[in-house]
Image: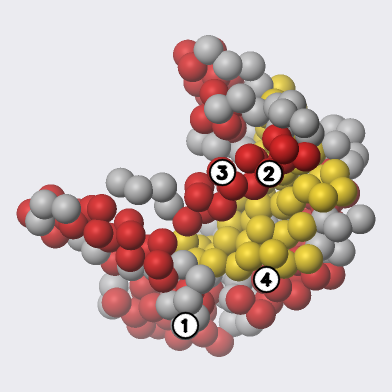
């Protein structure tokens, strides 16, 4: 499989951060980083990584994974209300799957913006409200699809919905701008790949690579981008 759209953007951002720092290791802050899905590979790639995560169980798994990978990660138990890290020092801040679950998304993003160094970036990945509507309709969950359409926050209130909100493109752009960041890139992640059954890929040689190439080509093309399963923003702190 080719690198996906999010990895491609972050690889370029980290290369730029190394250049800004004269070849020194980029400093990455992963907020809500869980068990280290992003943090461990980034540390292995030569980044100085700090993870802020409220769950002690997730941090225990992170430490185990880091030890097995032979890397060092600074693991901090906390949340966006008290990051416990110096302000203005991170070259790249990750907020992947975070803003959907925090109590106050604007306040959380403002905290992340304060943590990034001037010239650095915040990478935000969130669940897309319109993709959730389409996926539920396709699965036959028509009532849930209509409820998501009618709820401005994109939440299935009164259910065991694990998310407090879902986003669309205008709402995500507005949130980023209000945090004092500039939107450098807004792309989709999981446009068609989440809809293609694995048996189709297994039965067709080369299909997986072709699908990955299609995902990359479609990532920034509206309206396909606007119905991706997830939306990805790279936001820049300019001052």
Question: Residue 14: in sight, yes or no?
Answer: yes
Q: Nearer the viewer, mark 2 or mark 1?
A: 2
At 63% from the left and 40% from the top, the residue drawn is 15
Q: How many marks?
A: 4
- Residue 207, how many percent across, how many down? 18, 57
At 37% from the left and 63% from the top, the residue drawn is 215
At 10% from the left and 56% from the top, the residue drawn is 204
Give the residue number, with chain letter if any, for mark 1: 223
Disc 1 crowd rating (10 Å Cα; few below 14, some 14-19, many 20+) is few
N-terminal of the pair, mark 2 or mark 4, is 2
- Residue 6, how many percent across, how many down? 52, 53
Q: Are marks 2 and 1 in contact (CB under 8 Å)?
A: no
Q: Is residue 179 above or below residue 92?
A: below
Who is closer to the viewer here, 118 or 189?
A: 118
Residue 198 in which image quadrant: bottom left
Give the residue number, with chain letter if any, for mark 2: 16
Give the residue number, with chain letter if any, for mark 4: 172
Q: Are marks 4 and 3 in contact (CB under 8 Å)?
A: no
Horizontally, residue 52 falls left or right of residue 58, namely right
Residue 136 in which image quadrant: bottom left
């Amino acid at each position: 499989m080719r690198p996906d759209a999010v990895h491609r953007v972050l690889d370029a951002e980290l290369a730029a951060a190394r250049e800004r720092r004269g070849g020194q290791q980029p400093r990455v802050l992963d907020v809500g980083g869980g068990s280290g899905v992003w943090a461990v590979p980034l540390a292995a790639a030569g980044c100085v990584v700090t993870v802020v995560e409220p769950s002690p169980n997730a941090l225990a798994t992170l430490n185990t994974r880091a030890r097995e990978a032979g890397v060092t990660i600074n693991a901090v138990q906390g949340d966006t209300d008290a990051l416990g890290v110096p302000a203005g020092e991170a070259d790249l801040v990750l907020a992947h799957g975070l803003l959907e679950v925090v109590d106050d998304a604007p306040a959380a993003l403002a905290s992340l913006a304060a943590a990034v160094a001037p010239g650095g970036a915040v990478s935000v990945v969130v669940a897309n409200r319109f993709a959730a509507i389409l996926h539920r309709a396709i699965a036959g969950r028509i009532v849930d699809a209509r409820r998501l359409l009618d709820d401005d926050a994109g939440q299935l209130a009164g259910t065991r919905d694990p998310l407090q909100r879902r986003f669309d493109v205008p709402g995500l752009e507005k949130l980023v701008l209000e945090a004092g960041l500039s939107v450098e890139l807004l792309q989709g992640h999981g446009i068609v790949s989440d809809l293609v059954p694995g048996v189709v890929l297994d039965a067709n040689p080369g299909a997986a690579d072709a699908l990955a190439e299609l995902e990359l080509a479609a990532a920034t093309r509206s309206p396909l981008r606007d119905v991706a399963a997830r939306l990805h923003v790279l936001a820049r702190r300019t001052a």
